[in-house]
Image (cartoon, helix red, strand yellow):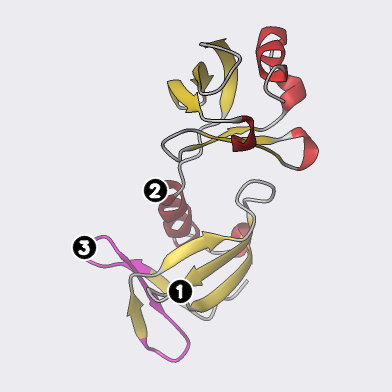
Amino acid sequence: MSIAFQLARNSFGRLVFTGADGVAREGVLPVRAFPISAPDFGVSLVDGDGHELVWIEHLAELPEPTRSLVAEELAAREFVPEIRRLRSVSSFATPSTWDLETDRGDATLVLRGEEDIRRLANGMLMIADSHGIQFLIRDLAALDRNSRKLLDRFL
């Protein structure tokens, strides 16, 4: 695929977008349209005011090193640990403190209420802790028996 823009980092590490018009715009941010359900499809590059500069249908369409720059920026901006296992919960009433194993290491979250657990498509759950961090359970059925048993008390 031939793209009509260039992407680079400036000396401060910020992305610089140069479009077909030759105008360079600093502080460009990639934004996923569907970060959980389709993370590699639909990425928009927006300027500092939130105006879309270009729509990328699929990240794989981008040539290297542009794809790497977009992927690095997305990884730095997005922090959604994926829950692998629930070790324990402090209580089945909320607020409740959960001891977790995630793809980013051990963690603890405080669940304020059952309304902070959102069901997504295909058996996925998004859980917000009291600090606003979003935790993802990609496949509820793939959790071990004990984790599902603990989680069922909150669903």
* Nearer-the-camera pick, 112 or 75: 112
Outermost residue, left direction? 11
* Nearer-the-camera pick, 115 or 1: 115
Q: Quadrant of residue 147?
A: top right
Disc 3 vs disc 1: Cβ atoms closer than 8 Å?
A: no
- Residue 111: give its label: none
Three-letter amino acid code at disc 3?
Answer: Phe
* Category of crowding for the residue at label 3, using alpha-carbon neighbours closer than 10 angstroms: few (below 14), some (14–19), many (at least 20): few
Tag 3, which secondary structure?
loop
Please indicate whether residue 25 sits to the left or right of residue 11 in the image. right
* Nearer-the-camera pick, 86 or 34: 86
- In the picture of the structure, the residue carrying the numbered disc 2 is 76
* Category of crowding for the residue at label 2, using alpha-carbon neighbours closer than 10 angstroms: few (below 14), some (14–19), many (at least 20): few
Please tell me which of labels 3 and 2 falls first in the chain.
3
Reply above or below: 118 against 98.
below
Three-letter amino acid code at disc 1?
Answer: Gly
The quarter of the image holding the N terminus is: bottom right
- Residue 50: give its label: 1
Outermost residue, bottom direction? 21
Three-letter amino acid code at disc 2?
Answer: Ala
Reply above or below: 126 against 144.
below
- In the picture of the structure, the residue carrying the numbered disc 3 is 12
Reply above or below: 38 against 30.
above
Residue under the point 37% across and 88% down: 23
Please tell me which of labels 3 and 1 falls first in the chain.
3
Reply above or below: 75 against 51.
above
* Category of crowding for the residue at label 1, using alpha-carbon neighbours closer than 10 angstroms: few (below 14), some (14–19), many (at least 20): few
Residue under the point 62% across and 57% down: 60
Tag 2, which secondary structure?
helix
* Nearer-the-camera pick, 15 or 138: 138
Q: Which residues are magenta?
A: 8-23
